[in-house]
Amino acid sequence: MKYRIFISSVQNEFASHRQALKTYILSDPLLGRFFDVFLFEDLPAVDLDLQDVYLKEVERCDIYLGLFGKEYGFEDSEGISPTEREFDHASAHHKLRLIFLTDISEKERHQKEQKLINKAQAVLVRKTFENIEQLKSSIYASLIHVLFEKGKIVSGPFDASFHSQAYITDISTEKLKSFIGLAKSKRGFPLSEDAGVEEVLTHLNLMSETGNISNAALLLFAHSPQKFFINSEVRCVHFHGLEMVKPIPSYKVYKGDVFALADQAVDFVMSKLDYSVGTRAKTTDIPGKYEIPREIIAEVIVNAVVHRDYTSNGSVQIMLFKDRLEVHNPGTLPLGWTVEKLKQLHTSVPYNPLLAYPMYLAGYIERLGTGITDMLRLAKAADLREPEFEQNEDFRVVVYRPTGEVTGEVTGEVTGEVTGEVKKVIMVLNGEMKRSEIQASLGLKHDEYFRTDYIIPAIEQKMIEMTYPDSPTHPKQKYRLTPEGRKLQKQFKDAKQDNSE
């Protein structure tokens, strides 16, 4: 048996939202098993009073889902809109009612629409939404709660389940504050950085009304996520050849929250890729680019971290070979999906919706549902072989490195006196620069990784020096090349010029 959802709204105001919600609910592996969706657009043309037809559908439904916004809509002879008629009919027939409001001020709403909202909120808890992705996240959480109450599921989806041994003190206020600042700059997140833990987690649907903490909240903001989920780590391996053979040049296991996991893993791969150095013909800085665009690397790794199956004992594994990057993710495609559908424009059906939405707010997922097509487009623009996707025991993505020689390259492997990481610092350092400026020039995000694998080795190898060597934490601290560093930078410049002639 499926529970029938009647979606009610002013027809023109939420047309795209209604269709997106229907597709989302029916495509989700869990929700699609238990729910069906009725939209008035689905009715065939009939010679009947439409309002009577809609009210009959309200009677047939199990859940009334109302989207209330700015407009009140068409008014009948009694001055009442179809949306209000449907809400009253659902109330009279004791239907479960879920109300979602656009996040706008009362002054922006039609006066009668505000009266309808006041009537609804007098008897119901309603939630606000700013965009379709937040609406999906809120509806997902509400429908999972419905299934719990009806006994259809005993233990819910991983991200929406509550951890029995987690408490509010396990959540890092510093991580929440950092997230809010990032989400504000990226997506206009409405809460202030001084908002309390309960307020933020409730806003993101990551905490129950009784104070229980969800698994998604722990993965995003816990002091130590691996305390709760030991397998929530990313393993990165670098091989010089085409196969997995020892000795292994570089092997790292990264831990931390999902933001840190993504940043560290991306930076690991970037540190091993060839970095092509340009000239100063049009700028005082030496322009450079990686052999694979950072956007592709970030997309495939963030997807693996966000959409993996966290109930699996496996971990995300990233393997860089001479000719390719392989990312293995213990997860599966949505029910009924194929790799070919994944490569086309498609609706967003994240494996862990409550985990994915904060990642979207923080800018780690640029546009939900378009990441794979963006990755394919970027690979084509960079003249790379099309990435491959494969679903077996796990989900595997292969991104191919370019064939042939890279002109003016600064390799990620150890060459001569210094490592590829140190060489990249040497090549982008121009005059005196802050650590953050050098890091941004190389497209790297994880501060600690950059410090330990780039800055410290470059100082130890006497290729760069601090402007305040006696005060490493000086607020005006910058870095500059040593005579030896300038000599090596010139060698790379000369080599580039020789290769271009």
Image: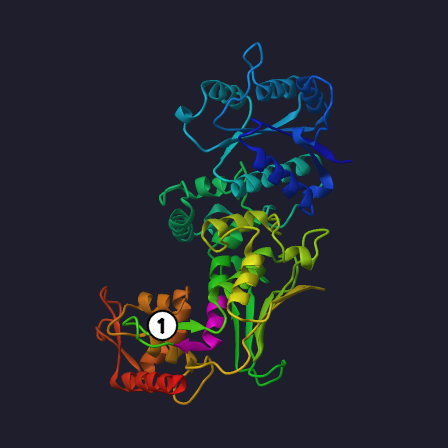
Q: Residue at x 54, y 61 (%)?
A: 377
Measured along the vertical axis of the image, is residue 407 above or below residue 34?
A: below
Which colour scheme appears in the figure?
rainbow
Q: Quadrant of residue 401?
A: bottom right
* Magenta span contains residue 270: yes
Placement of 399 over or under 179, stated as above or below: below
Q: Is residue 283 visible?
A: yes
Q: Position of residue 219 (x, y in %)?
A: 53, 54
Could you say whether the residue bearing mark 1 is in a helix, strand or loop?
loop
Q: Residue at x 39, y 42 (%)?
A: 195
Label total for image = 1
Q: Quadrant of the C terminus?
A: bottom left
Against 87, residue 165 (above or below) is below
Q: Residue furthest bottom?
A: 416
Residue located 70% across and 53% down the image: 337
* Residue drawn at (60%, 37%) of the image: 142
Which range of residues does the magenta coloring cover?
A: 265-277
Whether residue 229 is visible to the viewer of this picture, yes or no, is no
Quick one: label 1, few (<14), some, or many (20+) residues within 10 Å? some
What residue did someone put label 1 on?
287
Identify the image quadrant of the N terminus.
top right
**In front here: 58 or 204?**
58
Answer left or right for 187 relative to 333.
Answer: left
> Which quarter of the figure has residue 453?
bottom left
Which amino acid lies under the numbered mark 1 shown in the image of this protein?
A: Pro
Horizontal side, residue 85 vs residue 103: left or right: right
**Percent position (x, y) of residue 154?**
70, 43
